Image (cartoon, helix red, strand yellow):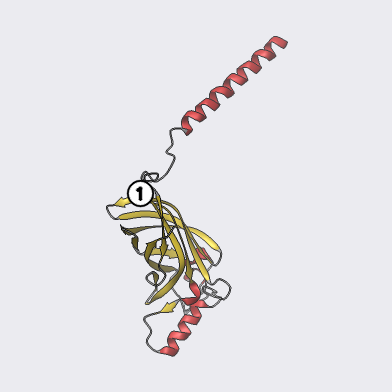
């Protein structure tokens, strides 16, 4: 019985060794970086110019802009390896309403606690997760968008150009479902009657970024 027990132990250790070795071999087969361009060249940090950068938004027939407070883009060779920026939600503006009083009422409604609640959440944030080249001058990006302290991943394509010490980025239209960020006011998902006033659940964003190489 003792001999059988010793044999079983040796077999168990043999199996554990084989499994562990297989894991090591498999782990070595995965790429170290999701972006094949990463690791080629020195890192360069570009500071976003908030005077030349903004987010364009659209909901149904209305549209406007939201300024960016600050942010950085980090390049390594031709690869975007990091990006993050802060958006000034409390400075959101409407551009399609000419009558000043109506414009003010509309902006205050969007900033109210029923929508973006900018008094409590004055900023939104974006943090890059990964990027890959999708064309000669374009990148497919994925990152976390935080609105009202709720974080969700978004994916979008952006046109990208780096010239000397400056960088420019212009995204395609980004569609988000506002209910994923806890914005349920006037949504069709919770309509109380056929005559309820409804607003689309889809908010469209288009981001324009301009940056300068950071002085070291």
Q: Position of residue 64 (x, y in %)?
A: 39, 76
Q: Residue at x 47, y 76 (%)?
A: 91
Judge by depth and name the residue closer to the eye, 119 or 69: 69
Residue tagged 1: 77
* Label 1 element class: loop
Q: Residue at x 28, y 52 (%)?
A: 135
Quadrant of the frame with the N terminus = top right
Q: Position of residue 41 (x, y in %)?
A: 37, 46
Picture layout, residue 152 above or below residue 124 = above
Q: Position of residue 39 (x, y in %)?
A: 40, 44
- Residue situated furthest right in the rendering: 2
Report if residue 1 is visible in the image.
no
Judge by depth and name the residue closer to the eye, 3 or 25: 25
Report if residue 38 is visible in the image.
yes
Q: Position of residue 75 (x, y in %)?
A: 39, 53
Picture layout, residue 155 above or below residue 49 = above
In the rendered view, does 15 fall on the left or right side of 75?
right
């Amino acid at each position: 019985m003792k001999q059988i027990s010793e044999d079983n132990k040796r077999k168990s250790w043999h199996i554990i060794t084989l499994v562990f070795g297989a894991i090591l071999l498999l782990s070595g087969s995965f790429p170290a970086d999701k972006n094949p361009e990463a690791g080629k060249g020195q890192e360069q940090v570009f500071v976003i110019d908030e005077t030349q950068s903004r987010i364009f938004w659209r909901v149904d027939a209305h549209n406007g802009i939201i300024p960016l407070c600050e942010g950085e883009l980090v390049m390594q060779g031709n690869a975007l390896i990091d990006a993050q920026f802060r958006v000034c939600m409390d400075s959101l503006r409407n551009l399609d309403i000419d009558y000043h009083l109506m414009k003010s009422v509309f902006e205050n409604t969007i900033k109210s606690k029923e929508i973006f609640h900018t008094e409590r959440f004055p900023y939104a944030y974006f943090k890059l997760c990964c990027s890959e080249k999708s064309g000669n001058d374009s990148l497919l990006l994925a990152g976390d968008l935080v609105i009202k302290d709720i974080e969700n991943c978004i994916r979008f394509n952006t046109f990208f150009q780096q010239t000397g010490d400056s960088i420019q980025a212009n995204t395609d239209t980004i569609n988000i479902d506002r209910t994923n960020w806890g914005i349920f006011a006037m949504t069709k998902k919770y309509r109380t009657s056929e005559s309820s006033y409804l607003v689309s659940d889809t908010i469209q964003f288009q981001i324009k970024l301009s940056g300068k190489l950071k002085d070291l």
